[in-house]
Image (cartoon, helix red, strand yellow):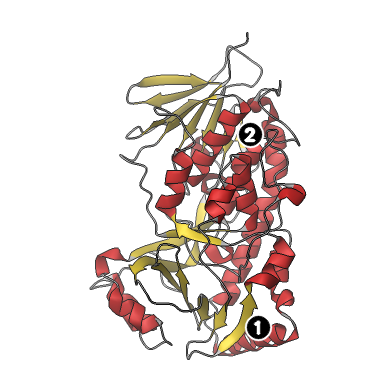
Amino acid sequence: MATAERAIVIGGGIGGLTAAAALRLRGLRVTVLERAATLRPVGAAISLAPNALRGLDVIGLGDGIRALAAWQGDGGLRAPGGRWLSRTGAATAAERFGGPLVLLHRATLVDHLAGRLPDGTVRTGTPARLLDPGVPGDPGRPARVSTPDGELEADLVVAADGIHSAVRRVLFPGHPGVVYSGFTTWRTVIPLPGVTFSSHETWGRGRIWGTHPLKDGRVYAYAAAVRPPGERAPDDERAALLRLFGDWHTPVPELLAAVRPEDVLRHDVHHIDRPLPAFHRGRVALLGDAAHAMPPTLGQGGNQAIEDAVTLAFPRPHAGPSSASPVADDLPGYTAARLPRTTAITRRAVRVARLNLTTSRVAAAVRDHAVAALSKAGPALLLRGFDGVADWRPPGGPSGAGGDGDGAPRMLAADHGKPGPEENTP
């Protein structure tokens, strides 16, 4: 009997853990190397759109995550004074995309993903460095990775090592890397038991605020503002938010009053402006922010990493554990499937950021008028921006994996442009 392929995943975030679970279903022996001491992620919450939930169906997690959906009824876009620019009902979006938008704490998703892996699969506190990308089809040239405990060899290496990926620099040393997107983000999760309100996002000039309830009774709040890169508040980041958003509509001041300064996360946003020439080289595949870091204005960073992971493991319809082709031999097809899609979504996210965060008074007024007019003409018009994004379905998956085709669960769905800057964290 042939020995199962061995895969090393560098990075134990959402994309890396999804890839590990999917590759195990494909029949590979997988080891995840995570430099942090634990899998507790940096970040507050993440939104999973229908496309990512269909990807999680492939590894058997889709329904469990859908059950955590908290948003019911209407939500929408507001102006800083409180006026609703548009309202969108969950049922309208469900008709278009056939799945929910689920907002949950990143730690909850990581726990679910890690639960799909056997004990010992993830090695925390283990930084890794790519020594040799290897050569597919040449048994004498496996990929080689160094760790503090020695070198490891693998038939496949998945680099999910984030926006400042060291593996990306090794594979493509001439690529310029990431650029500053022009704005910074703040995120926090606030315990507010018994308080209810509609999910909303508010657009000002050069500023955005969003508020969304979580299933466990907490509230996820996020903000974005056009600021110079590297800037930090002279006092604390809660005070910075009060200066920027303290006079905005309810419940923004109330939420800021309830948050502790130490619970506010701030990160400058970067993205890959020049697409990579490929998402692979040798036996190594780049995944998630390492391959296509994008602004969070479409809420698709983590969603696209999940798409990457299941496409890497199951690139063809009905590919399963019995597939005879080594995964490393399929890497050109992985690039062909993922690079054009993620490039288009990244460019769309950059355009949306410029619109949402315009600092021009005239441009902001025109933007708000256009949104209100489109909303009156029909909510479905505002959802067209997600055609080709939220309606994605996995190209393949092991026999019996749920969630594709007409078998995808039909639940409440909505995405109003972006749930928030929850991805793209350094």
* Mark 2 residue type: Ala
Q: Which mark is residue 290?
A: none
| Residue occupying the point 60% across, 52% down | 53
Which quadrant of the view contains residue 58?
A: top right
* Picture quarter with the N terminus: top right
Residue closest to the eye, 59 or 183: 59
Residue 228 position, x and y percent, is 41, 70
Examine the image and state in which quarter residue 389 appears: bottom right
15 or 233, which is in the foreground? 15
Q: Classify mark 2: residues with Cα within 10 Å, few (<14), some (14-19) or many (20+).
A: many
Horizontal and vertical percent position of residue 178: 51, 53
What secondary structure is marked by label 2? helix
Residue at the spot 65% in from the left edge and 27% down from the top edge: 327
User: What's the CA distance linking mark 1 and mark 2?
Assistant: 40 Å
**Residue depicted at 46% across the width and 44% down the height:** 112
Coordinates of residue 339 in the picture (x, y in percent): 67, 46
Direction from residue 161 to residue 388 in the image, left or right: right
Would residue 292 be seen by someone viewing this image from the given angle? no
- Name the residue furthest top: 1
Q: Is residue 212 left or right of residue 313?
A: left
Q: Which residue is mark 1?
A: 371
Q: Amino acid at mark 1?
A: Val
Crowdedness of circle 1 by 10 Å Cα count: few (<14), some, many (20+)? some
Circle on res. 313: 2
Examine the rendered structure and indicate whether residue 152 appears above or below residue 365: above
